[in-house]
């Protein structure tokens, strides 16, 4: 008897242990996603929590509220106090580390160090705001997709909880993760009803997209609707509300873009580019007053950073619209696939791009820039007293016609090396994804009409197997060439007739399912709805197909209207990227060299005048100097080498082309990485080619003319 009691207790303990260890599949999936997003803190969160251990700084009420709002939107696992502590600790540490250099360095360069410390503090302070802006754009773009899934599901089944559960499995952005939390909170009993949970989470969602929250409120009123017609009317009203709100938001955004685009075009591109033409003149006439390397660093580093900051603010104001299909690639982003025979080898992308840069730029580096640098250092070290005289002779050789054009070609190899390396870096990461996405978008665009045609055939109570055959026959009679959608339905037909699979298996069989042949989440999700509707008969499936077709058609119409409206606004940016920026920089690169060449010829003419009339000296105050040096104070030894001007302008062109492409992509598509990468790779190649052609044509045409004028003199 005692043994039996012990056995029973042992069995009870075993069952309790199994119950504690049991975790449902949904729970495991949810916890895995939570682990990835919550336990793996990023560098900013780790820094804030680490600094918070040692010192706690109160940010103040106003800053506390601002940071708290950004944290709520971005989902960062920090507090405003932790952020202010991190800013104080790291800024103070950096200042203490740089203080000895500030004291010991005698030149003006030491004042750059405090500016870097302040820039770091500003970066930490604005990091939560930047994360909030990017999260807001991602959530705004995702909100349209979420409402589409909810509305399609509610057309089939008037169950809002089921619609939320279905949508949560299909969306993985900020709102999609919140929907998973909603379901889990309801399962855990934190909320008794779905309405209570949605009301709580809406406080965060309203910061993403106010129209999304209003649409959810309209759908929550479905429980008070009795008949099917009233329910259909409510769904149609919700859809129209969302689409109209999206269109109005984008229209308001485009109208507000005019001034920012004008500022970017004028203050960020046109005026700075024309200012480049003054560099040679400043280096010659104001050598003692202006530090040219600092000015060049300001152009290449400071100005692009400021322009990038302003462009980010412009993009951050973009409301949510339509998102592109999610495309994944088996090859990591930081790898280049090199196929040798039947095997594909993955090569690290960054070292490969650097190697390609060296290969392309090698002629310019080995034959010109490295020898020129060595010559400069040699003269600087061996002729410290009369360095200016010897370096002036070197520059005269550089600006001579027989050297100007060949050296310009050598300089272009370095510019092309940088550009090609950047192009390969961006293109490699997205070229395969873009091809897949185009195929997906093409078949998704054809899906609208085919679903409506399928619904017409099903309306006669025709089984799904025969309906697909009839649909294929209609396509074969009307189409002169095979389309993607025809291939799609043929594969479904073959799976059902030749492999004897059900409609469900024809779509989602792990081996032969047609859904896995197309990396489109929209097709897969619609396939799930069609499969569920097919179980209820052809009539229900017909209504579902037509409803989905109408939804997709309305979305496509509004999306097309938004694209046309955006094209009018972004046409000026496209013109800048394609023509204005490379054309102007090409003119500046060549005109700068020609100006110095003209001054050099003027100096030589004055020297010949001195020799012709025996006017060797002239008095200026109490000093005696040559006529060529006294007239205009021409200091050719302080001039910038022509190839360095060309290289500097070319690098600046590469930077502004990338920034303009980021702006153009951000206005049209938000933070879509695939479009951004491909736009940069295509635009940059065209821009550098035009820059090279313009600069070389102007140099070839006008350099001999200036040389001849000097010879005549």
Image (tube, rainbow, N blue to C red):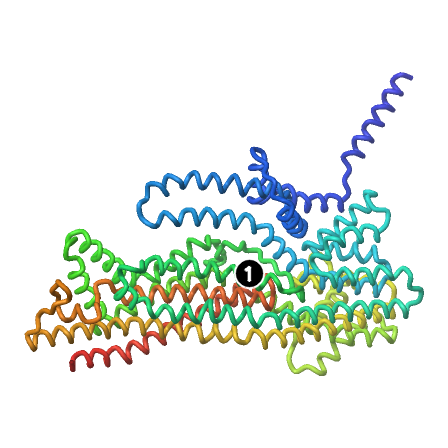
Q: Is residue 506 visible?
A: no
Name of the residue lying farthest toward the top: 2
Quarter of the image for the N terminus: give it.
top right
Q: Looking at the image, how many numbered discs can be counted on the residues?
A: 1
Residue appearing at x 40%, y 74% in the figure? 584
Q: Secondary structure at mark 1?
A: helix
Residue 592 location in percent, x, y? 31, 71
Name of the residue lying farthest toward the right: 226
Residue appearing at x 79%, y 30% in the figure? 17
Residue appearing at x 84%, y 58% in the figure? 160
Q: Is residue 346 visible?
A: yes
Residue 483 location in percent, x, y? 66, 75
| Residue at numbered disc 1 | 312
Quarter of the image for the C terminus: give it.
bottom left
Name of the residue lying farthest toward the left: 614
Question: Front-most of 120 and 418?
Answer: 120
Question: Front-most of 235 and 354?
Answer: 235
Quadrant housing residue 616: bottom left
Residue 50 location in percent, x, y? 56, 37
Pointer 1: residues within 10 angstroms few (<14), some, or many (20+)? Answer: some
Is 650 on the left-hand or right-hand side of 207? left
């Amino acid at each position: 008897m005692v043994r039996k009691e012990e056995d029973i207790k042992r069995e009870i303990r075993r069952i309790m242990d199994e119950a504690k260890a049991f975790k449902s599949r949904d729970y495991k999936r949810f916890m895995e996603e939570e682990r990835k997003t919550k336990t793996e803190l990023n560098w900013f969160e780790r820094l804030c929590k680490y600094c918070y251990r040692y010192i706690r700084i109160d940010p103040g009420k106003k800053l506390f509220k601002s940071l708290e709002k950004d944290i709520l939107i971005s989902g960062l696992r920090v507090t405003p106090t932790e952020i202010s502590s991190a800013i104080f600790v790291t800024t103070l540490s950096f200042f203490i580390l740089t203080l000895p250099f500030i004291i010991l360095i005698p030149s003006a360069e030491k004042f750059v160090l405090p500016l870097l410390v302040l820039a770091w503090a500003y970066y930490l302070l604005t990091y939560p705001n930047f994360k909030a802006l990017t999260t807001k754009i991602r959530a705004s773009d995702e909100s349209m997709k979420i409402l589409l899934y909810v509305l399609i599901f509610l057309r089939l089944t008037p169950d809002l909880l089921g619609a939320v559960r279905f949508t949560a499995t299909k969306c993985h952005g900020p709102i999609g993760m919140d929907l998973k939390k909603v379901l889990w909170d309801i399962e855990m009993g934190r909320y008794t009803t779905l309405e209570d949970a949605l009301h709580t989470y809406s406080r965060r969602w309203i910061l993403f997209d106010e129209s999304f929250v209003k649409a959810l409120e309209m759908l929550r009123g479905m429980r008070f609707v009795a008949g099917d017609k009233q329910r259909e009317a409510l769904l149609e009203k919700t859809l129209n509300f969302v689409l109209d709100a999206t269109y109005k938001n984008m229209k308001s955004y485009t109208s507000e873009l005019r001034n920012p685009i004008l500022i970017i075009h004028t203050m960020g591109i046109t005026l700075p580019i024309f200012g480049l033409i003054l560099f040679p003149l400043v280096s010659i006439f104001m050598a003692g007053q202006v530090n040219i390397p600092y000015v060049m660093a300001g152009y290449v580093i400071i100005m692009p950073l400021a322009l990038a900051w302003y462009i980010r603010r412009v993009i951050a104001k973009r409301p949510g619209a339509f998102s592109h299909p999610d495309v994944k690639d088996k090859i990591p982003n930081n790898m280049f696939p090199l196929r040798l025979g039947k095997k594909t080898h993955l090569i690290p992308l960054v070292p490969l791009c650097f190697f390609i840069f060296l290969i392309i730029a090698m002629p310019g580096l080995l034959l010109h820039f490295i020898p020129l640098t060595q010559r400069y250092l040699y003269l600087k070290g061996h002729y410290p007293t009369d360095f200016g005289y010897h370096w002036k002779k070197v520059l005269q050789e550089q600006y001579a016609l027989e050297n100007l054009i060949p050296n310009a070609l050598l300089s272009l190899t370095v510019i092309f090396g940088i550009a090609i390396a950047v192009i390969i870096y961006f293109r490699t990461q997205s070229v395969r994804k873009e091809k897949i996405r185009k195929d997906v978008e093409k078949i998704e665009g054809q899906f609208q009409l085919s679903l409506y045609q399928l619904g017409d055939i099903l309306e006669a109570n025709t089984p799904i197997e025969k309906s697909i055959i009839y649909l294929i026959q209609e396509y074969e009679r009307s189409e002169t060439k095979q389309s993607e959608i025809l291939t799609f339905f043929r594969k479904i037909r073959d799976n059902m007739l030749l492999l004897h699979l059900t409609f469900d298996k024809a779509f989602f069989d792990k081996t032969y399912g047609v859904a896995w042949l197309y990396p489109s989440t929209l097709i897969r999700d619609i396939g799930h709805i069609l499969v569920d509707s097919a179980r209820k008969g052809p009539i229900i499936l017909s209504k579902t197909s037509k409803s989905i077709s109408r939804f997709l058609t309305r979305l496509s119409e509004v999306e097309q209207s938004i694209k046309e409206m955006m094209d009018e606004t972004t046409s000026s940016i496209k013109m800048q990227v394609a023509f204005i920026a490379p054309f102007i920089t090409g003119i500046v690169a060549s005109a700068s060299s020609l100006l110095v060449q003209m001054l050099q010829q003027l100096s030589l003419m004055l020297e010949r005048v001195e020799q012709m009339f025996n006017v060797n000296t002239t008095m200026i105050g109490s000093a005696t100097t040559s006529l060529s040096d006294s007239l205009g104070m021409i200091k050719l030894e302080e001039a910038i080498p022509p190839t360095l001007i060309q290289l500097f302008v070319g690098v600046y062109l590469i930077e502004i082309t990338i920034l303009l492409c980021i702006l153009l992509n951000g206005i049209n598509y938000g933070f879509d990485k695939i479009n951004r990468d491909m736009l940069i790779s295509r635009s940059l190649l065209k821009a550098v080619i035009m820059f090279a052609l313009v600069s070389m044509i102007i140099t070839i045409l006008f350099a001999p003319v200036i040389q001849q004028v000097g010879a005549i003199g």
